[in-house]
Amino acid sequence: MKTKDRNSKVIFIGFVIIIFMFICALVNQWIEIKEVGKVDQQGKTSLVSTENVNTKNEIEEENIMIDDENTIQDTSINQTKENILTTYKGYPVIAKLEIPKINLETYVISEYSDQALAVSVTKFYGGNPNGVGNFCIAGHNYVTKNMFHDLKNLVIGDTFTLIDSNHQEGMYKIYLVETVEPDETQCLSQKTDGKIEVTLITCTTDSSKRIIVKAVKI
């Protein structure tokens, strides 16, 4: 009987250990999800936190496709002939960003949220794209075709294009590339002296700091 009781205790202890490990795994996953995209929605007191994608194989890598149903014929010489989506994976689109140097074409979702940030880059702060002020775009550094993994390879003098939902195309030239602490939010300032600017934001590989790329419309 003693041997049987001892075996029962061993089985019971083993079962408890398995349950404990399962709970720990769930807690760790929950913590990881909560860490993605931390931001103070009230005063934007901290910049978006983005993580390295090397361990995020669940993020689907795909080409950004143009939806034929959204094709609009543009005849004005002040407008781009390129058509952009009105929604991307169920989220409303406010602009399309094209950075030739790093082979990036991505849709900018109009409102920031943790869920939207996991799908594409998003508007983080500011007014409207191609409008006076500082249009701030945040994105994860995921190794996918529509994210900001290669933002770190941009330098002063590089250019990119922003196409808004009205099909107006703006060309921008980078004038500042820097790495800052998460609580340094000067890059979000809307004081542009009447200029039209764009700020791109992502995180470093270890997610400890933020990479900031600022450009002005030319």
Image: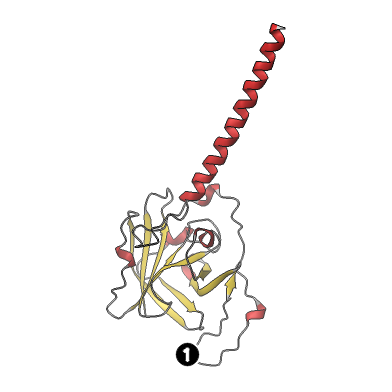
Q: Which of the 4 quarters of the picture holds residue 83?
A: bottom right
Q: Which of the 4 quarters of the picture holds residue 190?
A: bottom left
Callout 1 secondary element: loop
In which quadrant will I find the N terminus?
A: top right
Q: Nearer the viewer, residue 19 or 65?
A: 19
Residue for point 52% across, 67% down: 103
Q: Nearer the viewer, residue 137 or 52?
A: 137
Q: Nearer the viewer, residue 103 or 17?
A: 17
Q: Nearer the viewer, residue 12 or 142?
A: 12
Residue for point 54% across, 47% down: 55
Count of marks, rendered view: 1
Residue 197 place in picture, x, y as percent: 36, 75
Q: Is residue 126 left or right of residue 142?
A: left
Q: Which colour assignment does the render follow?
A: secondary structure
Q: Is residue 170 left or right of residue 45?
A: right
Label 1: few (<14), some or many (≥20) within 10 Å? few
Considering every residue shown, the one lying at the far bottom of the view is 76
Q: Is residue 117 left or right of residue 9?
A: left
In which quadrant will I find the C terminus?
A: bottom left
Relative to 24, residue 139 above or below: below
Residue for point 42% across, 79% down: 130
Q: Amino acid at mark 1?
A: Asn
The residue indicated by pointer 1 is 78
Relative to 79, residue 201 above or below: above
Residue 77 place in picture, x, y as percent: 50, 92
Relative to 37, residue 99 above or below: below
Residue 44 place in picture, x, y as percent: 36, 62
